[in-house]
Image (cartoon, helix red, strand yellow):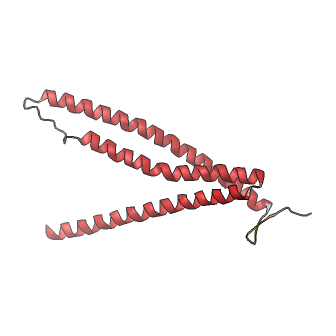
Amino acid sequence: MEQSSSSLFSLTIDPITKAHLSETARWARFLAIIGMVFIALGGVGVLYFGYIMSSMGNSLEEGYSGGRSAFFPGFGVGVAIFYIILLVIWFFPLMYLLRFSSRARRALHTNDQQALNDSFLNLKACFRYVGILTIIILAFYTLGIVFAIVGSAAFS
């Protein structure tokens, strides 16, 4: 019994590898679509939160005789902008993951080498993006710990 395989830079894509890659593409598509749905729901939630915070600020402001709000001015807008930035940041790895999935599936169905190359290019971009984002987050955590240590030593 002979197995069909395709040559790829001295590597071969045999039926087992093809099945694994196909399943990986299906899971990547699932995760990307679910992530996009949550981003859309998050966007609606941010708009709703901004509206609620604006309404609360206006109603609290009218209730005080001095006309001062109990909230920091612009708190709702600041939080909304922060969450919009987070949603935009997480959109890109999901987009790369969805592109990987669609191009890998097309490559496996049509034996298209260029589509396979494009799919792996998008997978690499996804991991690189998440890796750089992880480094940035770790840097912020490190700075936070350093500032906490310095702050606690200064006030001791």
Residue 100 visible to an observer of this rendering: yes
Residue 156 visible to an observer of this rendering: no
**Quadrant where the N terminus lies?**
bottom right
Q: Residue at x 33, y 67 (%)?
A: 142
Q: Which residue is drawn at 15% across and 27% down?
A: 62
Residue 48 located left or right of residue 147: right
Give residue 81's position: percent from left, percent from top.
Answer: 33, 44
**Quadrant where the C terminus lies?**
bottom left
Q: Which of 75 and 113 is in front in this view?
A: 113
The part of the image, by quadrant, that contains residue 49 is top left
Asked if 118 appears above or below 135 in the picture, the reply is above
Q: Name, please, the residue furthest toward the right.
A: 1
Give residue 41's position: percent from left, percent from top.
Answer: 46, 38
Asked if 97 appears above or below 156 in the picture, the reply is above
Q: Residue at x 39, y 37 (%)?
A: 45
Residue 67 located left or right of residue 148: left
Q: Residue at x 62, y 48 (%)?
A: 29
